[in-house]
Amino acid sequence: MVAQRVNAKLPARGGVGLKADHYRTILDDKPDIGFFEVHAENYMGAGGPPHGYLEAIRRDYPLSIHGVGLSIGGADPLNKDHLARVKDVVDRYDPGLFSEHLAWSTHDAEYFNDLLPLPYTDATLQQVVEHIDEVQTFLGRQMLLENPSAYVFFKESTFEETEFLREIVKRTGCGLLLDVNNVFVSATNSGGSPEDYIDRFPVDHVHEIHLGGHAPDTDEAGLPLLIDAHDRKVADPVWALYARTINRTGPLPTLIEWDANVPSWEILAYEAAQADVMIQSHCQAHSTASAERSGHVSEV
Amino acid sequence: MSQRSDNTEENVTVKGYGVPLEDLQLNLQHFDRFSDGLMNPEVPVPDGVVGRDGHPSEKRYGVYRNNVMASLIDALAANFPAVHDLVGRDYFRALAAEFIRENPPEQPVLSEFGSNFSEFIGAFPPLADYPYLKDVVAMEWAWLRVYHGANATAVAPDVLTTVDPAKLGDAVFTPIPAYRLVYSRFPLNRIWKQTRSDHVEGFTPEADQAILICRPDMDVTLTGLPQDVAAFADLLFFGKTLGEAAEAVAPAYEGFDLSQALGSLLSARVFARVDVKA
């Protein structure tokens, strides 16, 4: 028996990752927030309080489901049991979007619980494409693939990441989740330009944006090494990169990821409100610009 | 090999779904090499894995090593908070690291990670003087399974008023899916009270040999059961009729009180239904 739920579609607003610490506040106060996102793997038990809370929250808010365990970028065949459990969660909650990562986490049937990097070659392209085909066929819906954070690079890579993603989209019809913090982290770690990456990204296929906090460090050569820690506020240069991103993509559902040192609801919601403000000012600038353009046309 | 701009036959295979076999072999080796060092700090940085300057970087590969071990240890600590508190943070992290290296998770749902942690601790020589730890782990594992178990509506404690008294002996009691019965020769309840927020009020380990963990609603509840009631409960859970279970338990335990035993199980709301066997 499923009670009436709000429409599944995610609005082009700020949303937040749902944390158990905030269940009660959300149900009691019904805060105004665009949407929630959960990790599929946290809702794979048969029943119990996690489902009780999520079911209640889903009635009032759109939801996106983000998988962290399919190991889409891995060399092993997909774990069929796990894929079936992902489908159970997706069917249970009717999310507006389902996403996974361009990364791997399982090898030789060992699960590493981390989003591990892959070289971008013809061989890995083939395995990623096959895995995404399998996921989309099994779930009966489109999935989004997220660009990863990278700390290391591979001499054997023959594709730029943006080209690799473009090729995956072309071959599978999947959508993309653009994690702007990951772009900043990877570009800093590789010595590249995050702006160039955004400018080259196949933005027509992006359906969701992620933002999160990163931790600064340096490697043994004294070069900057940013860690995608999701343990603090979104950094100012990442907000600036976000503004550049929505200039290209237009307004999109934008998630704040804060998974460690989880703050109070107020602080988390404030981050999402920042995204709302930036989306609104983008829309205003855009409508002013198009009004000016159309005014121009009518004069001619 | 990777350029995709012309129409030679080689490029057609590469662009389609026919990557040459030797490339797939090399590809597999990449994943083998990258995996090998994730849980083993002795293994050097894999070949071809480099930092921004093109050189192998221990620090950078070490981010992955650290993420893997730290996150799995955190997951185990989240599943077994009482054991974590009992042995202390540093000891737990070292213990968990050993366990994880020998028993890495085989699937991504980490609330289901640690099914054999109890056996591991029971057989861990440095903890031989702390035999109760194995039972604490087993109880935490049972609690976790109950917490995440399937939901079901429990029958009301007065359900037997709806059963014809003449047929009560043929009644079969089906438990809700979210229940476990744990036994220990140690005072688990006292340990539980020290380390976790819920516990059984008035539990006396001398008299109470078992703890019934169940979740008739959203909250997990604990009920202490004397040995005879636990034995009786086990038989009912196994599908024996009320009459069969009572007949089996009464001779073994002097002073077994059937109505009291049934009353305490019904109050715990561990049954989903009661049927009279035809």
Image (cartoon, coloured by chain):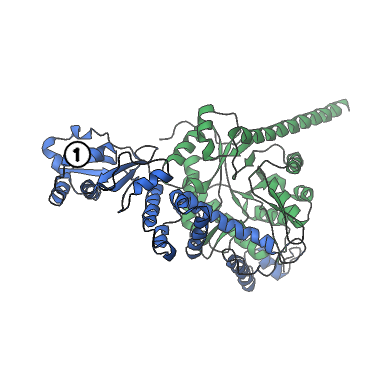
Q: Residue furthest right?
A: A300
Q: Chain of mark 1?
A: B
Relative image position of residue A240 (x, y in whole percent): 76, 41
Figure quadrant of the C terminus of chain B: top left
Relative image position of residue A224 (x, y in whole percent): 75, 54
Figure quadrant of the N terminus of chain B: bottom right
Q: Residue A159 falls in which quadrant of the image?
A: bottom right
Relative image position of residue B88 (x, y in whole percent): 49, 53
- Looking at the rendered structure, the number of numbered marks drawn on it comes to 1
**Does any portion of residue A25 appear in the rendered image?**
yes
Q: Residue furthest bottom?
A: B22
Q: Residues within 10 Å of mark 1 (few under 14, many from 20)?
A: few
Under mark 1, the amino acid is Gln
Indicate left or right for A266 with B209 as reference: right
Q: Is residue A158 above or below residue B151?
A: below
Q: Colour of chain A?
A: green
Indicate left or right for B7 with A15 as reference: right
**Does any portion of residue A118 appear in the rendered image?**
no
Indicate left or right for B201 with A89 as reference: left
Q: Label 1's element?
A: helix
Q: Residue B150 falls in which quadrant of the image?
A: top left
The residue closer to the viewer here, A134 or B37, is B37
Q: Colour of chain B?
A: blue
Relative image position of residue B238 (x, y in whole percent): 24, 51
The residue closer to the viewer here, B185 or A72, is B185
- Disc 1 designates what residue? B260
Q: Residue furthest left?
A: B166
Indicate left or right for A257 with A156 as reference: left
